[in-house]
Amino acid sequence: MSTLKYLIFAACIAVFCTGCSRPAPVQKADQKPAEESSAFRLYVTNEVSGDMTIIDSATYQVIATIPLGKRPRGIHASPDRKTIYVALSGSPIAGPGVDESTLPPPDKSADGIGVFDVAQKKLVRMIKGGSDPENFDISKDGTQLFISNEDDAAVSIVDVASGAVVKSVKVGEQPEGVKVTPDGKLVYVTSEETGTISVLDPAAGKILKTFKVGHRPRSVAFLPDGSKAYVNAENDGTVVLVDAKKQKMIEAISLGKPGVIKPMAVLLSPDAAKLYVSTGRGHQVFTIDTATNKVLGSVEVGPRPWGIALSPDGKILYSANGPSNDISVVDLATNTVVKKVKVGSSPWGVIALER
């Protein structure tokens, strides 16, 4: 073979080998998650997506989204702040006026209280909570849960250690809000359809009294001394002031036109000087001066604000806005929304928890 042929052959081999060889892949820099701060966390239940969003309050970054189960709604932390309890329900979503006979059957296997370990960031247990749990409160010593069972017109008393329903007591139709009195001796349960408060004695396992408070009550907030309580009346556009000793209405505080302003959640500031009220389709959160029971003002936070929470120092308010799938961050000094954080689908409840 001539020298020229050798050169051509060698060149072809080189080209062939070059074509077959692949360049070493470019190594991408490790994509580390954003460092978490030591600030308190926000925990948000998302009713439609069935999960909980965890937010770093310093950066407003979403740290994690944790699957929980069907329709997570009521959310509360244990007294030692190590555990978060979440009400889960397999009943289909049905708004006011919906013909429930047209809905799919409830999945009772999904009913319960999810037990979330804060340190591990995971759901560790499911305990019984009666039929269709919606909201609840916790005894002062953390040993019992008092749970509203919406479709059963009852409140369940649950032993946390065993996970058993100790007793179920009948209340008004469509119970929702549950609140333990400051001394821990009684439990108030609101019933939307009957417009009443049922006063439960958990030790005796019976209802002591039932009294009217307005149309569609959902939420209760007690003054620290237990003398009075505030209860929303959704369809009246009011917040009702209750004498908690005599267990009767004192007055109704108007927030706006009924049907337009629809009070939902009530929440007291750390010093109990102010009451904050979310208003659902009213798009606003109102502030009431508890010394005078006069409305101080309001801030528009988004469509259908439902659950609300305060930062530990009481300077920031957070509202869960269902249709927009976000949390509004409100600076209470200026009464303005300073940020919105996207969460899961149809946020329902929100709590702030220090690390």
Image (cartoon, rainbow, N blue to C red):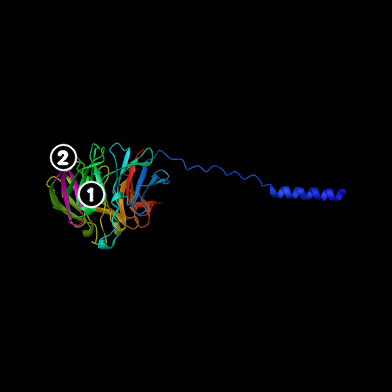
Q: Quadrant of the C terminus?
A: top left
**Relative depth, front residue between 348 and 68:** 68
Q: Residue at x 28, y 63 (%)?
A: 102
Question: Can residue 275 be seen in the rendering of this structure?
Answer: no
For the residue labelled by badge 1, is the local secondary structure a helix, a strand or a loop? strand
* Badge 2 amino acid: Ala
Disc sitting over residue 20 in the figure: none
Look at the numbered disc 2 and give the secondary structure of its residue. loop
Q: Residue at x 22, y 59 (%)?
A: 235
- Between 101 and 233, which is closer to the camera in this rendering? 101
Answer left or right for 121 relative to 183.
Answer: right
Q: Which mark is residue 203?
A: 2
Q: Is residue 130 magenta?
A: no
**Residue 12 location, x and y as percent?**
77, 50
Q: Which residue is mark 1?
A: 148
| Quarter of the view holding residue 142 | top left
Q: Amino acid at mark 1?
A: Ser
Q: Is 190 one of the magenta-colored residues?
A: yes
Residue segment shown in magenta: 184-206
C-alpha separation, residue under disc 1 versus residue under disc 2: 17 Å
